[in-house]
Amino acid sequence: MPVANTTCWTLIEGAANGQVEERETFARRYEPAIRAYLTARWSGGRLMQDVGDAAQDVFIECFRAGGSLERVERGYGGGFRGYLFGIVRNVALRWESRRARESARSQARAEDMADLSSREDSLTRVFDSAWAKAVMCEAAERQSENAQRAGLEAERRVELLQLRFAEGMPIRDIALTWECDPVQLHREYAKARKEFHQALKDVVASHQASATPAEIERSCNDLLGMLG
């Protein structure tokens, strides 16, 4: 099975077991959310230059023997998003504590910590937004892989969604470009959206192994809200 089409937990288990391809895919998939959180947390501060190194520390914490990926359980409350957020936040706190010990400006450090405490909700929203984007990309990949197996019409619908959302083209303009009936194209567009939504539900289900269908649907709606 191609790594891009593995479930979240299959990927996590492979990465925890030291499989190189799974670790590379794990890093590619989740690094944007990790870096977005650290960048927002340390923006304008002395640690901003350390975002890249701190992100690497997150992966070290995940991949090391006996590390975070080996300890995570499929039934973890909130799914893997909540678990990864906890890892990133803990790594950030370690970096901040280390810098505090190295700095003689303890008063400035106390002020920094007070500021972080007041910004915690907004920092969580930054992580959630980046996480939602990563999940949407994963769903798009899954829809594309499903379409390749289903045939040319399904692949055409994937292209239709890309033109509509990535390029911002109205359906009527796409119909002119493709020289097809706009009414029929609207039907295909509706079908394409349903296929994407199913791919999104599949991805969310892979993140929340014990979730019910209703919980998965709510999580999909929450993800869309995080993008706003």
Image (cartoon, rainbow, N blue to C red):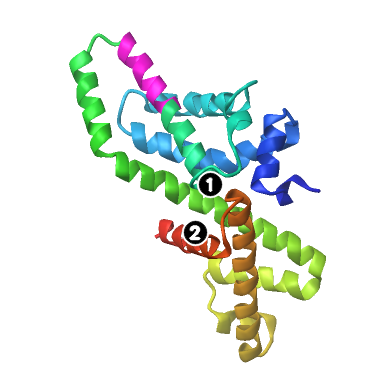
> Where does the magenta region start and end?
91-102
* Residue type marked 1: Gly
Q: Which residue is mark 2?
A: 219
Q: Residue at x 63, y 67 (%)?
A: 198
Residue 162 visible in the snapshot: no
Relative depth, front residue between 69 and 122: 69
Above or below — where is 184 with respect to 27?
below
* Residue type marked 2: Ser
Q: Are marks 1 and 2 in contact (CB under 8 Å)?
A: yes
Label 1 secondary element: helix
Relative depth, front residue between 66 and 173: 66
Label 2 secondary element: helix
Q: Which residue is mark 1?
A: 79
Residue 54 appears at what percent x and percent y?
47, 25
Residue 111 visible in the snapshot: yes
Q: Based on the displayed image, in which of its 4 quarters is residue 106 positioned?
A: top left
Q: Circle 1: is it few (<14), some (14-19), or many (20+) Cα within 10 Å?
A: many
Q: Residue at x 38, y 14 (%)?
A: 98
Residue 50 appears at what percent x and percent y?
43, 24
Q: Residue at x 50, y 29 (%)?
A: 55
Q: Residue at x 67, y 69 (%)?
A: 159
Q: CA distance from mark 1 to mark 2?
A: 10 Å
Q: Main secondary structure of the magenta part?
A: helix
Q: Circle 2: is it few (<14), some (14-19), or many (20+) Cα within 10 Å?
A: some
Above or below — where is 111 with respect to 176?
above
Query: Which mark is first along the chain, 2 or 1?
Result: 1
